[in-house]
């Protein structure tokens, strides 16, 4: 790098916080087996992903110091406890906070805790003047092809997450991408074999969306190209290997987390027979009627099942 180029370029610190999507799972580095042997962090060289692609795009105009602190499986609480301090210590000019889907799939789900964690993280990350990058989530249950009894409660929880991010954006500004309006989300080629994580094409689409928003905010960034390095087709052996080593255990964990809650929710939607006393429908944390199930108070069903008829 020449001295002239160094002096002409502004130094830019970029910190990325979040879960496996920001780690880059689904977009393996060249030479890494696809879908197997997933690394736990974005620092082990296994994955590339949207944040790294964006950092490389920014590097064409800035001297970029990129710090990816994301960890697979992280919740908002994990971000606060294990990623936030290192991110603040990086003194970022640009910081991404994309987390929350794992929260929706845990039996420990607590909208109040999620809100407190995301607002706290946003406050600390922007206190030094960093530009905050966030996202609103799409109906991930539809992409996963979940059965209705799991998809509906998951989507209601995602609506709660999005409402919190609306509050974060209103309070701290920055740029954000609404994944529900992103055409790539509806393209099967944008998803890896597990449908939980973007493929290389999907990671590129997400990086491009953020690049466009950053350009609108005044940064100089040429979006990464849309086409992947190679449109590698997943072999049946890799597909089967993922199902055995990842999908079955994952579904087992999620059914244990969401299954009992979804079953209770379905039970409480059974119409009340005439003459049976029961609570009136409650309102969800997202602000709508929720058929006796008040989403938003931990993992508890707040409505009481109809009392047995007397006499």
Image (cartoon, rainbow, N blue to C red):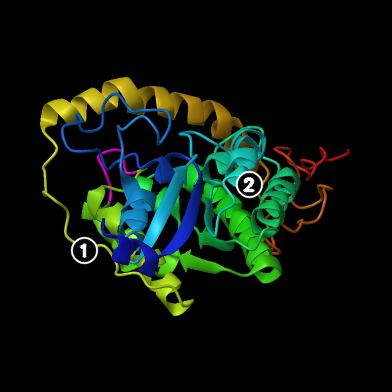
Q: Is residue 296 visible?
A: no
Q: Is residue 231 visible?
A: yes
Q: Image quadrant of residue 246? A: top left
Mark 1 surroundings: few (<14), some (14-19) or many (≥20) residues within 10 A: some
- Please report the residue visible at 12 percent of the width from the left and 30 percent of the height from the top: 236
Q: Secondary structure at mark 1?
A: loop
132 is higher (above) or lower (below) than 309: below
Point out the stretch of residues depicted in magenta: 191-195
The numbered mark at residue 225 is 1
Query: Which callout, 2 or 1, points at the residue further toward the start of the chain?
Result: 2
9 is higher (above) or lower (below) than 158: below
271 lies left or right of 65: right
291 is higher (above) or lower (below) than 302: below
- Please report the residue visible at 63 percent of the width from the left and 32 percent of the height from the top: 107
259 lies left or right of 196: right
Instruction: Determine which residue is flagged by label 2.
Output: 88
């Amino acid at each position: 790098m020449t001295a002239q180029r160094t002096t002409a370029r502004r130094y830019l610190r970029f910190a990325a916080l979040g879960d496996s999507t920001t780690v880059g799972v689904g977009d393996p580095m060249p030479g890494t087996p696809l879908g197997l042997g997933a690394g736990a962090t974005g620092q082990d060289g296994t994955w590339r992903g949207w944040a790294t692609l964006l950092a490389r795009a920014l590097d064409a105009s800035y001297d970029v110091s990129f710090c990816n602190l994301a960890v697979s499986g992280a919740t908002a609480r994990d971000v606060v406890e294990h990623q936030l301090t290192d991110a603040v210590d990086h003194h970022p000019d640009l910081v991404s906070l994309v987390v929350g889907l794992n929260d929706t799939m845990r039996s420990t789900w607590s909208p109040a805790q999620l809100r407190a964690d995301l607002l706290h993280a946003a406050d600390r990350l922007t206190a030094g003047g960093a530009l905050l990058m966030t996202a609103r989530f799409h109906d991930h249950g539809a992409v996963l092809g979940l059965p209705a009894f799991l998809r509906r409660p998951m989507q209601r929880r995602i609506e709660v997450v999005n409402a919190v991010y609306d509050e974060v954006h209103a309070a701290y500004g920055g740029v954000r991408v609404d994944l529900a309006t992103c055409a790539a989300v509806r393209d099967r080629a944008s998803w890896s074999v597990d449908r939980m994580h973007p493929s290389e094409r999907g990671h590129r689409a997400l990086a491009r969306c953020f690049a466009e928003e950053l350009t609108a905010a005044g940064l100089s960034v040429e979006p990464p190209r849309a086409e992947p390095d190679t449109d590698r087709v997943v072999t049946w052996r890799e597909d089967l290997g993922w199902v055995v080593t990842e999908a079955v255990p994952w579904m087992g964990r999620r059914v244990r987390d969401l299954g009992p809650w979804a079953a209770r929710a379905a039970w409480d939607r059974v119409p009340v027979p005439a003459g049976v006393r029961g609570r009136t429908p409650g309102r969800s944390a997202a602000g709508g009627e929720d058929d006796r199930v008040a989403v938003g108070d931990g993992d508890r069903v707040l409505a009481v099942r109809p009392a047995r008829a007397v006499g």
